[in-house]
Image (cartoon, rainbow, N blue to C red):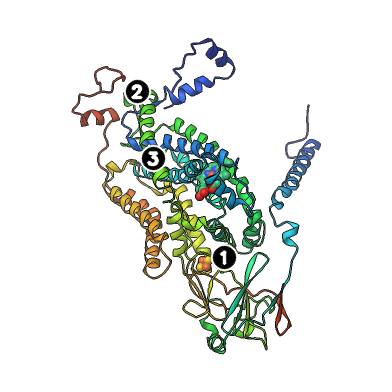
Amino acid sequence: MANTASPADPTRRDFLYLTTGAMGVVGTAAALWPFIDQMNPDASTRALASIEVDIGAIEPGQSITVQWRGKPVFIRNRTPEEIEAAKSVPLAELRDPLARNDNAAADADASDANRATDGMENILVMVGVCTHLGCIPLGQQGEYGGWFCPCHGSHYDTAGRIRKGPAPENMHVPVYTFVNDTRLRIG
Amino acid sequence: MSGHSTYEPRTGVEKWLERRLPIVRLMHDTAVSYPTPRNLNYFWTFGAILVFMLVVQILTGVVLAMHYAANSAVAFQSVEAIMRDVNWGWLLRYMHANGASMFFIAVFIHMFKAMYYGSYKEPRELLWILGVIILLLMMATAFMGYVLPWGQMSFWGATVITNFFTAIPLVGEPIQTLLIGGFAVDNATLNRFFSLHYLLPFMIFGVVILHIWALHVSGQNNPLGIDTKSEKDTVPFTPYATLKDVFALVVFCLFFGWFLFFQPNYLGHPDNYIQANPLVTPAHIVPEWYFLPFYAILRAITFDIGPINSKLGGVIAMFGSIAILVFLPWLDTSKVRSARFRPLFKIFFWVFAITCVMLGWLGSRPAEGGYVLAAQLFTAYYFAHFLIVLPLLGFLETPKPLPTSITDAVLAKNGGHAHPVGAAASPEKH
Ligand code: HEM
Ligand code: FES
């Protein structure tokens, strides 16, 4: 096995070692991926369902909870006082400055107008999951009359914006459209 | 310490094995002739108690799995069927559920013992780190096990804990989705948790073997924290340690039995006898008692720290409270192991122990008013103990003089007469 090339000179053998090794790494990674990706949501979960909800029967001051993609969605018919309370908050006082509304621009500010829909601003639609660690906040409670999360004490106002406690973000508003005055489609 | 082997194969079978797989020698060296310091106290029996509890959990778990069904539609009913219909099912399930608590009681005592007597110091750093890994695996196992009965606490505990991951910027949400296999905790989550709950205890078993191997290389620490110097400082594992361990185990089983037969639900939570409901969060979500101190630390961070928001901050603090244990051998700057010779450390040790208990209590309280402030203070102290107190003490404290050997110390205490039966009966020479 005499080899006259100096150690700095890559030989044919070095080349084979390296390419074999590299193929081995790529192959192992490729074989590993199915083992990891199988844990992601399966096709039936991913099949993005949208739901339609009748909101005609929700009286002002009332709210209902529906299930969408395994998560609760709050639909609240806000009273004029509740809307007024949400509107009168200076934006600088909000802990999360973003609207978190999938129907608005990603950088829209968290004003009450950006949380609800123009003309239907009494109807507030939100994924009812606390942005802290995922509990379901209780409606018509807390220091701001909106929601209170009992798990670790987060207070949301009447626009579902985080005001106090450990949660970092306003509750998220999912994509929705009004089919007509009394029907709402989520998703 | 491990020294040379004194094993002599005698019977034909032993001789046959000796040339092929010297497993009898391994057992003999580990559990019979292995020299243990002669001054060990009862805190040193918790290692054996822990091995026993691991075996109890695996045995009861395997038979529970014969009756349990990991499907969100029937899981709750299958556990109730174990309680009512399966022969002895109530006993097996209560053994398993309370066994987890006993396992944690034992591991906490075991760890505080290591801290008091400085067992994590050179040359036992790796032994200690393997212990921290076992603790982490135990926590993961117990967390996933608690999800299996699919009660309200199971479901909401799983929701809250898997949501920790969403605190991580950018990759957090994909990771959480990957873990629970959906957009919310559901059947996919339950299935994989069952699979992992079955697997992890066997991984614990593997790490326990490494832990014991490391122990047998460095040798056991002892209440004086000084090295064994001669054979006189030790007694053979069998019968001395073996019988002491068995006695302690019997006493521990009485304690276990009291919970098992008289208060089987005392350590659990009544809400877990309500089937999981994804639309209703219980008024107070509390984890199992053994997670409470960590839970209190999580909730204590209610404020943003620079770019880190309160949620991420809480998760970092909680994982940090365990991760910091890994660095304990280097944070403690004192060369003296045992608290017996460290007058200041002894005081701070107890302050730390009380801090942990207080955090546990605060974790069970609602997160409001004075409780939050108290949790913040104790959390700050928890970290200060490791990051400020221990590094400084090594420089500021004057340790008491150490005895020259274990034997000298034992004899001085017993008026210079007693020597252990079975140890070399030669007169003490210096
Ligand atoms: C490190 C060891 C283990 C620990 C700490 C542990 C812990 C737990 C805990 C806390 C529960 C919930 C009990 C309840 O409240 O009902 C549980 C349930 C369960 N575990 Fe384990 N476990 C361990 C090992 C195992 C093993 C090896 C198996 C084997 C398959 C197993 C199978 C089960 C089953 C089927 C359940 C559901 C039935 C029930 O809830 O009682 N466990 N485990
Ligand atoms: S989950 Fe709502 S405050 Fe923690």
Compared with residue B320, is residue B103 higher up or lower down, i.e. above or below? above
In the figure, residue B183 lies in which quadrant? bottom right
Q: Please state the horizontal and vertical placement of residue B81, each as a whole percent of the image.
A: 56, 47
Expressed as whole percent of the image width and height from the top left, the position of residue B192 reads 64, 49
Tell me, for residue B119, which label it has, or none: 3
Local crowd at mark 3 within 10 Å, few (<14), some, or many (≥20)?
many
Give the Cα distance between marks 3 and 1: 40 Å
In the picture, the quarter occupied by the C terminus of chain B is: top left
> Which dot, 3 or 1, sits closer to the camera?
1
Q: Residues within 10 Å of mark 1 (few under 14, many from 20)?
A: many
Most distant residue in the right direction? A12
Q: Count the numbered circles shown.
A: 3
Q: Residues within 10 Å of mark 2 (few under 14, many from 20)?
A: some
Quarter of the image with the N terminus of chain B is top left
Q: Residue furthest left?
A: B415
Q: Which mark is residue B231?
A: 2
Where is residue B40? Give x, y as percent.
33, 33
Amino acid carrying label 1: it is Gly
Q: Is residue A66 visible?
A: yes
Residue A134 tag number: 1
Identify the amino acid type marked 2.
Glu
- Callouts 2 and 3 close, C-beta under 8 Å: no
Q: CA distance from mark 2 to mark 3?
A: 21 Å
Residue located at (79% from left, 38% from top): A16
Dot 3 falls on a residue whose secondary structure is loop
